[in-house]
Amino acid sequence: MPLQIVRNDITKMKVDAIVNAANSSLLGGGGVDGCIHRAAGPELLAECKTLGGCETGSAKITKGYRLPCKYVIHAVGPRWRDGNHGEREKLVSCYRTSLVLAKEHSCETVAFPLISSGIYGYPKDQALKVAIDTISDFLLENDMTVYIVIFDRKAYQISEKLFSDIAAYIDDTYVDAHTDSRASQLRRMQMLSEEPEEAICGAPMAASAKSLDDALSQIDESFSEMLLRKIDEKGMTDAQCYKKANIDRKLFSKIRSDRLYKPSKATALAFAIALELPLDETKEMLMKAGFALSHSNKFDIIIEYFIEHGNYNVFEINEALFAFDQSLLGA
């Protein structure tokens, strides 16, 4: 998928470029900056000394040296004061400038830390939103795979309210799905005992039998056919759909060219989200791929929460899925 949130050590990422949360001198420091300089070796510092520093909100690029990446993009994020001194604009500029540099150097894969969220004090939930929004906007117009690399759980945080709301929804839905009083069980058993045999066992075999031709004529459209039909109905282009779904163009091409292609559940749901399908149509699209939503599955409940609340932003959904230790939407 074009944008992924991963837990890893950014110095171990085998990508074309990693982004360093640098200070304005570009001469190394603590946190991510220090780790990257140590892993790259003294050659990185030697090149950085030739760059003459960097302004806050901008970025400069060097070689990767002993790192497994080709380049290091040194982005200087803002220090958090109170949010009223241009912090957001400068942080957005950090991401945009870094992505443009990566594109100019033909990078296909780039890994970012959560810039300014450490010792610079930018609130982690707001820093994450800026990162997701800025990167996803860039990816709507450009083909690139971008990683947001989180070293540990303490370095990652969605808004407390969103986390609490989803947690409450999960809790309520689990209760609804699994609470079944003794009285409810007895009522259901009584209803079954009062139904006629035909209702329980079904119609006689002769009445329900169909010829092979009849059965074949009733074969429904495939997942691929439904997807392409929905794209047309929504007036979207293919690119608008797969980018909004956080799906790689090559995978979409496979789905388009193979009528019987069977996607993963995460891929099928990503397209349903991109098409902004209501819950009943989402379930129908999932069924075409051989899946269903379940109230015993936390991943499914989180997806349902966002659909019920009319939020079809796949990147925000993935933030929440990551926060709850679930797999992400996309390929």
Image: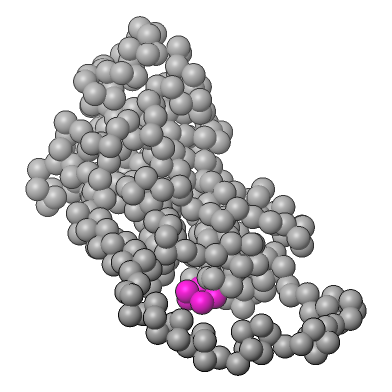
In screen coordinates, is 283 left or right of 55? right
The structure's colour scheme is one colour
The residue drawn where x is 23% and y is 36% is: 154
Number of on-image labels: 0
Between 136 and 313, the one lying in front of the other is 313
Image: 217 above or below 224:
below
Image: 204 above or below 69:
below
Between 81 and 228, the one lying in front of the other is 228
Residue 22's spot in the image, x, y percent?
27, 27
Please say whether residue 98 is one of the residues in the magenta stretch.
Answer: no
- Magenta highlight range: 277-281
The residue drawn where x is 34% and y is 27% is: 20
Residue 212's spot in the image, x, y percent?
89, 76
Q: Is residue 264 visible?
A: yes
Question: From this viewpoint, which residue is outermost toward the left?
Answer: 82
Quadrant of res 55 = top left
Q: Is residue 130 visible?
A: no
The residue drawn where x is 79% and y is 79% is: 218
Quadrant of res 190 = bottom left
Question: From this viewpoint, which residue is outermost toward the top?
Answer: 42
The residue drawn where x is 39% and y is 81% is: 186
- Is the stretch drawn in magenta largely helix, strand or loop? helix
In screen coordinates, is 229 left or right of 76? right
Between 302 and 318, the one lying in front of the other is 302
Image: 89 above or below 58:
below
Residue 286's spot in the image, x, y percent?
58, 65
Between 260 and 126, the one lying in front of the other is 260
Residue 155's spot in the image, x, y percent?
25, 36
